[in-house]
Amino acid sequence: MNTYLNMALRQLVLQQAVPFESDEPSWVPNEETEKALVLARAKELGLIPDNAPAFDDPKRAIRYLNDEQ
């Protein structure tokens, strides 16, 4: 086990990738996550306004978060 782990870690460093195939299916977002991704991309592209608050002062951000509850 120690030898395999050592070899696998060396390959990870050399290849900068996992040195074996994964049987796990690729990640597929659920409907809620897909909607959030589309919304974020639309805001990024300027298709819809990004009305998220922005703060320069951490104290104002904390105050805003506390007021939201």
Image (cartoon, rainbow, N blue to C red):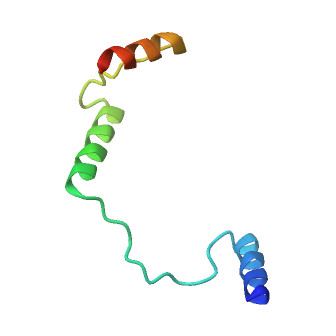
At horizontal 53% and vertical 15% (from top left) the residue drawn is: 58
Q: Is residue 18 above or below residue 60?
A: below
35 with respect to 11 (left or right)? left
Residue 23, given in percent of the width and then of the height, sits at 44, 84
Query: In which quadrant will I find the N terminus?
Result: bottom right
Q: Is residue 37 above or below residue 47?
A: below
What residue is drawn where x is 71% and y is 81%? 8
Image point 25% across, 52% down: which residue?
A: 34
**How many marks on residues?**
0
In this view, the residue farthest toward the left is 31
* Residue 31 sits above or below residue 17 on the image: above
Give the position of the C terminus as an image quadrant.
top left
Instruction: Answer left or right for 12 relative to 48.
Output: right
Q: Nearer the viewer, residue 50 or 32?
A: 32
Instruction: Kindly indicate the quadrant of the structure image that contains residue 61.
Output: top left
- Residue 21 appears left or right of 13: left
Q: Position of residue 27 (x, y in %)?
A: 37, 66
The spot of residue 50 in percent (x, y) is 31, 25
